Image (tube, grey):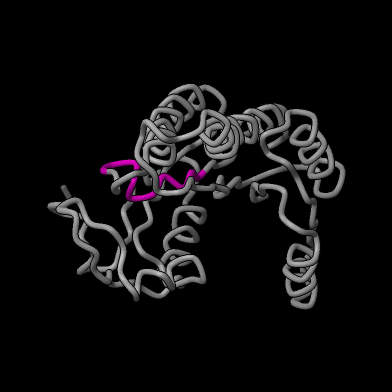
Amino acid sequence: ACSGSGRRPEPLQAVAGEIEAKGRRALAQPTDIGDEASVIELFRRVEETFGRLDVLFNNAGIGAPPVELDELPVATWKAVVDTNLTGAFLCTQGAFRLMKKQQPRGGRIINNGSISAHVPRPFSAPYTATKHAITGLTRSTSLDGRAHDIACGQVDIGNAATDMTVRMQAGVPQPDGSTRPEPTMDAKHVADAVVYMASLPLDANVQFMTVMATKMPFIGRG
C-alpha cells in the first residue's frame, strides 16, 4: 500500500491497470490521508482485498509557497502538517493495526524523509519542519515496532528528475541569496532503493538511506 493525498482516481487506476496487466492484483483507493476516517477505510479495503499488508511506503507530501516565515498563513502551515506529518502518522497507525494481528505477523514501513529532513531550503519552514518530524516518527515506529516484528526505515531523497523538479533547470533559490540550477538524478534510482529496502527480511533493516544527485548542493548546504 502507498499513501495518497487526495489524488485524482484516474492516475491511480492507470497504475493499478499496469500492475494487473502483469498478472498481479492491485487496489486503487483514492484517500485523503489527512482524514482519519478516509485512512481507516483505506486499510479496511487493503485487508478485505489482500488479507494482509507487508509494506507501507509513506510518500505523500506537499510544500508551501516560498515566502518569508512571518508572511506564511497559518492555514498553509496546517495544510502541510496535515498531509506530510499527520497523514504519515495515520497511515502508520493503520499499518500497525493490521500488521500486529495478521499471521504471519509483522511488516515493513518506509518513510520518505527527503533531504529536508536534514537541512532546509530557503523559505521552507512548513516542509522542513514536517520532514524533520518524519525522522522522529521513523525512530519511534522502528522502536515501538520491534515487539510486533514491524520494521521501519527512512529514505531521504534528493533531486529526482520528475515534473516537480523541472523548475530546477531554470534555477532555485540558494542560501546565499543567489538562484542557480541544480543537478537531478533519474527517479529510477529512488525506486531501486525503495525496492531494496522493501525486499529485506524482517530481521534486517535499512534505518536511514540518502539517495541524491551526486553534485546537488546538499553537503555544505547553508
Which quadrant would residue 215 be assigned to in this image? bottom left
Please state which of residues 20 and 80 is positioned toward the viewer in this rendering: 80
Residue found 58% across the figure and 31% down from its top: 75
User: Residue farthest to the right?
Assistant: 48
Task: Determine whether 22 is above or below 135 in the image.
Answer: below
Q: Is residue 15 left or right of residue 66?
A: right
Magenta segment boundaries in residue numbering: 110-119
Q: Residue at x 64, y 50 (%)?
A: 2
User: Does the magenta-highlighted stretch encompass residue 115?
Assistant: yes
Residue 87 vs residue 202, the one in the foreground: 87
Residue 52 position in % (x across, y down): 74, 42
* Quarter of the view holding residue 213: bottom left
Q: Position of residue 67 (x, y in %)?
A: 39, 44
Q: Is residue 138 visible?
A: yes
Residue nearest the observer in this picture, 96 or 170: 170
Report the label total. Answer: 0
Q: Is residue 163 left or right of residue 157?
A: right
Inspect this view and state whether residue 149 appears. Answer: no
User: On the rendered structure, is 197 left or right of 92?
Assistant: left
State whether residue 125 is above or below residue 189.
above
Q: Residue at x 44, y 30 (%)?
A: 142
> Percent x, y for residue 199?
51, 56
Picture coordinates of residue 195, whole percent (x, y) = 50, 61
> Does 62 lie within the magenta span?
no
Residue drawn 20% across the image and 60% down it? 217
